Amino acid sequence: MAVRAIAAALDDPLDDAQRRPIVRHNLHDAIVSRVRDMIIEGTLAPGARIHEGHLGQELGVSRTPLREALKYLASEGLLELSPGRGAVVRKFLAKDVKDSLIVLANLESLAGELVCKNASDEDIAQIRKMHDEMLRHYAARDRLVYFKLNQSIHSAILRASGNSALADVHGVLQARLRRIRYIGNESAEKWAAAVADHEEMIAALEERNGKRLAKILAAHMDRTWDRVRDSI
Amino acid sequence: MAVRAIAAALDDPLDDAQRRPIVRHNLHDAIVSRVRDMIIEGTLAPGARIHEGHLGQELGVSRTPLREALKYLASEGLLELSPGRGAVVRKFLAKDVKDSLIVLANLESLAGELVCKNASDEDIAQIRKMHDEMLRHYAARDRLVYFKLNQSIHSAILRASGNSALADVHGVLQARLRRIRYIGNESAEKWAAAVADHEEMIAALEERNGKRLAKILAAHMDRTWDRVRDSI
DNA sequence: TGACAAAATTCTGTATGCAGCATATTTACG
DNA sequence: CGTAAATATGCTGCATACAGAATTTTGTCA
């Protein structure tokens, strides 16, 4: 199921360094995750044409399952297919990014209201745990792990909202922007502001104040635009 | 690009009777549209397992491009992939439908505000044209053409909003629900109420009253739930 | 030297074949 | 006669091979 695959990848977005070899069972999912990560990390640069032969060799798989994975990713919007010319890594223009952030703000806002209604206490505790861990990595200025936890928190909120369609489309948009948000350098103040947003978030969530959480999430997304606009 | 393919299919959702043969150029898109239509029309029933050999033979293509199309549709959420067992037409539970409608209401609401700001006069004139034609087919009680135009109007509003990410995710959710909305029988009164909604819609659009249009679209989507809930 | 045309190369698109797994059927046994 | 094991069948997953389109290279002429 699409949702699961996306959700799984969201939990483990940017694995550092070199990759474990492709697993033998469920090759499709493995290739999809790997290529998705390569796009997000920039190994496959935006606008770059994908050479099926080379990439297949690099991953140690033949062209057939690789092509299937490429079609899958094209449907997610990470690749574009031009007939006769194969797949190209999609370039996101500034407008695409801004448009996506507007939609994300809306979706997260809705999720904020729902999660306060529908989340179990364990869900919230789990999110709080991630939040605390994220704070530790903020204190250590460990940007990569911070980023991964940040994404995981947002995904967890969406999942805990109980609306899988919502989590699904959110996952697609979040995946599209992950690279840009990752490379988007934020100054110390902006980073601090983002952390402050998260503090408010978790507070609103724990008091199950849907309206407030929705507002914070939307505003948080608005500020994200300021953080990434220069890196597009 | 995913968006284009979806948008194209939205314009021509349920072509009646027998199909033109698969075109030779751009086989991928052709197969994707055809299989998507077969799912929407119910030729491929929800829960049904897809037999690659048979379906390929029926469409006159080999398994390779067919499998690629199946992965693509799985990413759209119309199919589910289970390793070793191939693709199965996704079953939408009542909750899935309701969840999707909630998200759709939100997205269309946002689109309503945007379209009043961003649409060109020609865009609006075009939508008005579709609306008038839809009314003629309502008068003739031609449910199929009415349905197609209805869907096209919603898609056109989304496209005219100028936010492609928004139109994109809307397209995915709309595609998932198309079959259910199509078979959802509405009584004469409910159908009339839907038409009345559309009248209000077009009025709000023409006076570019974003708030009003957003409200109408959201309410329209809420009522859709009543129309389809029994047919799930 | 630059531009155009033709040939050669490379890459994509599709079909086919085979291995392995899942399922259906048969057979053996309680 | 029912249940479980064993066998047989069928289907999916993957690799490879080939045809045709796209691109690059080479050659020729102005």
Image (cartoon, coloured by chain):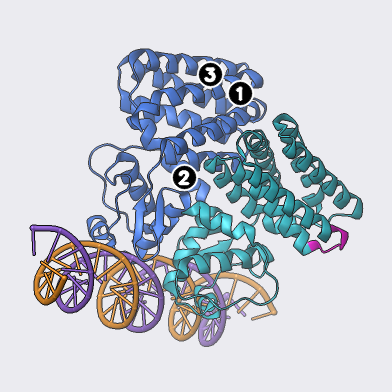
Chain colours: A cyan, B blue, C orange, D purple
Q: Residue at x 66, y 77 (%)?
A: A18
Q: Amino acid at mark 1?
A: Ala
Indicate which disc residue B202 carries. 3
- Measure the alpha-carbon separation of dots 2 and 3: 24 Å
Q: Chain of mark 1?
A: B
Q: Is residue D1 above or below residue A108?
A: below
Indicate the position of residue A172 as horizontal and vertical percent values: 58, 50
Instruction: Say what secondary structure mark 1 lies in.
Output: helix
Specify few, some or many for label 3: CA neighbours under 10 Å numbering under 14, 14-19, or 20 or more.
some
Q: Is residue D28 above or below residue D11?
A: below
Indicate which disc residue B6 carries. 2
Q: Earlier in the sequence, mark 2 or mark 3?
A: 2
Q: Chain of mark 2?
A: B
Image check: A53 left or right of A16?
Answer: left
Q: Which of labels 3 and 1 is toward the front? A: 1
Could you tell me if the residues under marks 1 and 2 are in contact, i.e. CB atoms within 8 Å?
A: no
Question: Which image quadrant is residue A162 in?
Answer: top right
Indicate which disc residue B214 carries. 1
Q: Which residues are magenta?
A: A138-143
Indicate the position of residue A192 as horizontal and vertical percent values: 88, 50
Q: Residue at x 40, y 23 (%)?
A: B227
Image check: B54 left or right of B102?
Answer: left
